[in-house]
Amino acid sequence: MSQALREAIKESERLHDYLRARAVRAAQRDPRPAMNLFITSLNEVIDLHTKRLSALRNHVPAIVFLLLYFVAAVAMAVTGYAAGLVGQRSVWPITITAILIATVIAVVMDLDRPRRGLITVSQQSMMELRDSLNRPVP
């Protein structure tokens, strides 16, 4: 995780704490239903922030990758053994099997890192939210 991302997370959590404290004080002074709606919405924002951070920090366990490598090795060994029993080697099935196994491993590794690689998670909705919050109020 980059230093800029760590700082952004700290800043957003500081803002969450600030907003929560202000909302609680305002609700104590003026307990109207509208204030309860604001507090509920603020809690949802904080919950979504936590879920996004959890998704960013959660990775596929190393044992899954070890299992994938083990399955790949066994599959290729069985393919080679079967070719030895038959007495001839067929290049296409072996090549296709190797490519498919390598592709599955590569896709799992790519999905494990949502911010880089071929498969990325769009941050467009968050950028639009940031822009809307930075717009001047008419």
Image (cartoon, grey):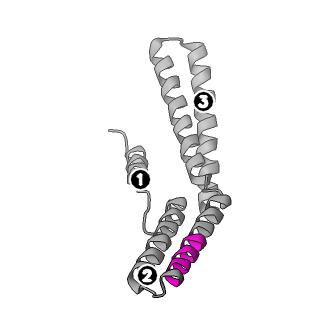
**Observer able to see residue 1:** no
Residue 7 in the image: above or below residue 106: above
Amino acid carrying label 2: it is Thr
- Please check the rendered image and state whether residue 76 is part of the magenta-colored stretch, yes or no: yes
Q: Secondary structure at mark 1?
A: helix
Amino acid carrying label 1: it is Met
Magenta-colored span: 72-84
- Please check the rendered image and state whether residue 130 is part of the magenta-colored stretch, yes or no: no
Residue that badge 1 annotates: 127
Quick one: label 1 or label 3, which is nearer the N terminus? 3
Q: Secondary structure at mark 3?
A: helix
Which mark, residue 95? 2
User: What residue lies at 61% left-to-right and 50% top-to-bottom?
Assistant: 9
Q: Secondary structure at mark 2?
A: helix
Q: Residues within 10 Å of mark 2 (few under 14, many from 20)?
A: few
Residue in front for this viewpoint, 110 or 8: 110
Foreground tag (2 vs 3): 2
Q: Is residue 2 left or right of residue 95?
A: right
x then y, percent, for residue 102: 49, 73
Q: Residue furthest front?
A: 86
Residue 21 in the image: above or below residue 59: above
Q: How many marks?
A: 3
Foreground tag (1 vs 2): 2
Structural distance between the alpha carbons of marks 2 and 3: 58 Å
Structural distance between the alpha carbons of marks 1 and 3: 23 Å
Residue that badge 3 annotates: 20
User: What residue lies at 61% left-to-right and 22% top-to-bottom?
Assistant: 24
